[in-house]
Every structure is written in C-alpha cells, then in structure tokens.
Amino acid sequence: MTEPPRRPRRRPARIVRVETYARELAAALRLADWSITVAVESAGRDAYASIDTDPGKVAVLCLGPPFWRATPEVQRATIVHELAHCVFAPMALTLQQLGAMLPDGRGRALEVSLLDVEHEVIGWLEHVLSPSLPLPPAFGGRR
Ligand SMILES: [Zn+2]
C-alpha cells in the first residue's frame, strides 16, 4: 500500500495576509520584480523584522513579536523599511566583496561603516515613503 502524498503544512492565516500586503507595498515601491515571501519563523524575540535577499531578487521577510503588537502605522513602516533593503541588496553584496579584499580587518570596518550609512538612508526612506502607502489590514492572531 502506498502512502498518500504529504500535503504541505498550512501556513498561519496572518502570515499569508501579511505576505499579500507586503507584495502590495512592493508593487507600489516598484519592487514587483522581486519574489517576496514571509517566513513562518520569527525574526527573534525582540526584533520587529528582518529580511534576507539574494541576487536573484528573492526576499524572505521574517517578523518578530514586536511587529505583531505594533500599530498599523508602525507595521507599514516596518515593511517599507525591510523592502527598502531589497533596493540596496546589490550594494550590500558589493560592500561585502570589497570588505573581503582589504587587509587587516580594514575591509570589515569599511563595510560596517558603509552599512551604517545605508541604514540611515533606509530609515529616511521609510519615514518619507510610508505615509503615502496604504495601511495594512488587521492581520489577526496575537496582537
Ligand atoms: Zn534595516
């Protein structure tokens, strides 16, 4: 007797809802060519969110407990922030490669300092762009 094929595990409804919203924001931010998914795994106990990107324009967004407790305005700003990391992903990769070429840890120091600048710009973009974008629906779950 053969076993029935395994069904993929169902993803929580709030993850599916936030993924739909994140893709809507990505389209509004001209990032529609990115494949955006939201991980079921948490970004960490104290983190609002994090995002992993790869050169193939694939991004995986992770959300943490503070995100789920945040106001819709903060949730929107958080997702805009993480999506802005997609824009800078090629630069972050170049910085990493450049950092590895310089001797004596100087490359790493340069990389860290330039990544700080990138983060300043992303923070600025988050505040400038967020108010013009739609607020999220209620995602449900623990809030
Ligand atoms: Zn960031």
Image (cartoon, rainbow, N blue to C red):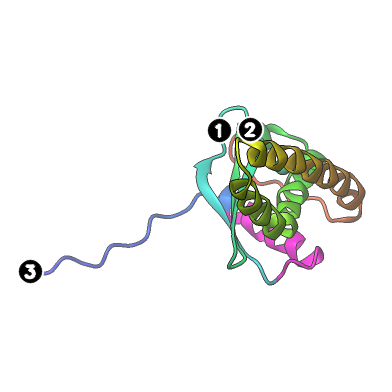
- Where residue 29 sits: x, y (%)? 80, 63
- Reading the image, the residue beneath label 1 is 44
Vertical arrangement, residue 28 with respect to residue 88, above or below? below
Quadrant assignment for ligand 1: top right
Q: Residue at x 64, y 39 (%)?
A: 108
Residue that mark 2 sits on: 47
User: What's drawn in magenta, residue-wise?
Assistant: 16-32
Q: Amino acid at mark 1?
A: Gly
Name the mark nearer the viewer: 2 or 3: 2
| Quadrant holding the C terminus | top right
Q: Residues within 10 Å of mark 2 (few under 14, many from 20)?
A: some
In the depicted view, which residue is nearer to us: 52 or 111? 111
Query: Does any portion of residue 5 appear in the rendered image?
Result: yes
Cα distance between the residues tagged 2 and 3: 47 Å
Residue 1 figure quarter:
bottom left
Q: How many marks?
A: 3
Residue at the image point whose x is 81% and y is 65% from the top:
28
* Amino acid type, mark 3: Met
Residue 21 in view in this figure: no
Q: Which mark is residue 1?
A: 3
For mark 2, give the secondary structure: loop
The reply, left or right, for residue 122 in relation to residue 46 is: right
